[in-house]
Image (cartoon, rainbow, N blue to C red):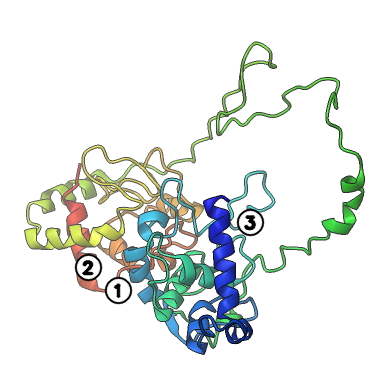
Amino acid sequence: MSKSRNFLLTSVATALLASPVMAEKLGLGRAALPEEVAAWNIDVSPNGDGLPVGSGSVEVGEQVFSENCAICHGEFAEGVDNWPKLAGGMDTLDRDDPLKTVGSYWPHLSTAWDYVHRSMPFGDAQTMSVDDTYAIVAYILYSNDLVEDDFVLSNENFLEVEMPNKDGFIIDDRETSEKHFWNAEPCMTNCKDTVEITMRATVLDVTPNDTTDDGPVAEPAAAEPEQKAEEAAPAAAEAVVAAVAAVDPALVEAGETAFKKCKACHQVGEGAANKVGPQLNALFGRTLGSLDGFKYSKTIVAMGEEGIVWDDATLAEFLRKPKDYIKGTKMSFAGFKKDEDIAAVTAYLKTFAN
């Protein structure tokens, strides 16, 4: 008997012996105590059954998410490498390559709560408290633009949160609707006269491309670059360069620490490149939405066309509440709560004037 089968039978036997009837009948073991059953009975249903009492805010969730989840899912739930994205993808489900996230695809919020509480963080499952789980889920909702930054999720308002794709699923009726396919005798040999490649997995590069196929893979067309705004005002840029020498080193050091919240999307320094967000070298004096090679939202491009330039005031307003300053911004970062953090990040970015 294989080890896996033996383990399965042992587990089933143990469960049976722990039941009140079997324990009493066979005189082996004892019935599981109510608290022992409760420890395993942690699933949460879409109607809220099983949801424990507790609450958590977006603000707390941002910190807890950063400490426990961001290493795989990114600081803003944007995903890291092959780890899944948890935010974004709205209005993509009707496309050939939809982005399925908690916000765009999942029909029930209970699925997110249940999964986080029972299985996360990876490698350290079931270590999150009830309140921290509420906070993480609240932050995921915020990252999907489904709640405001002052939102507090609790067992009391849990069912009031309406997921965008709640009506996007149907009852699986294949057992009856496709019964005629299953009852038919399957074809096992010579089922088609010819076999030919009709589509290619160009993204994954897995479609065979030899002398027997229908030609080379066509390279995907390059995306048209978004129209850029005019270059930053030279006078403003020169003023920033002159001011760098007067920056307080202690403030810069504090800014480097605070900037860790930004590093998931933005790079600075030698070799900085555009990632999820644009690189931030020579930011001050730059017209909004004008950096070559990065596709900005329409709002920020329009602001740049109006002549708005990044300086201390505009950056401070943006960092305080990004979504209020630039409507429709891709950034899911809630913003810095403390003025000293904004001042520190500003000082830090000024050291990258070139």
Q: Are marks 2 and 1 in contact (CB under 8 Å)?
A: yes
- Residue 149 in view (yes/no): no
Q: Quadrant of residue 310?
A: bottom left
Residue at 72 percent across and 67 percent down: it is 167
Q: Secondary structure at mark 2?
A: helix
Label 2 to label 3, Cα distance in Å? 35 Å
Amino acid type shown at disc 1: Lys
Label 1 to label 3, Cα distance in Å? 31 Å
Amino acid type shown at disc 3: Asp
> For the view shown, which residue lies furthest in the top direction?
211
Of residue 130 and residue 81, the one placed in the foreground of this image is 130
256 lies left or right of 29: left
Label 2 to label 1, Cα distance in Å? 8 Å
Of residue 107 and residue 186, the one placed in the foreground of this image is 186
Q: Which residue is mark 1?
A: 337
Amino acid type shown at disc 2: Asp
Classify mark 1: residues with Cα within 10 Å, few (<14), some (14-19) or many (20+). Answer: few
Q: Which residue is mark 3?
A: 91
Residue at 83 percent across and 31 percent down: it is 188
Q: Which residue is mark 2?
A: 341
Q: Is residue 23 above or below residue 169?
A: below
Coordinates of residue 333 in the picture (x, y in percent): 38, 63
Q: Is residue 285 above or below residue 108?
A: above
Q: Is residue 22 above or below residue 327?
A: below
Q: Secondary structure at mark 3?
A: loop
Q: Quadrant of residue 31?
A: bottom right
Give the mark nearest the N terminus, 2 or 3.
Answer: 3
Of residue 241 and residue 45, the one placed in the foreground of this image is 45
166 lies left or right of 314: right
Give the mark nearest the N terminus, 1 or 3.
Answer: 3
Where's the C terminus, which quadrant?
Answer: top left
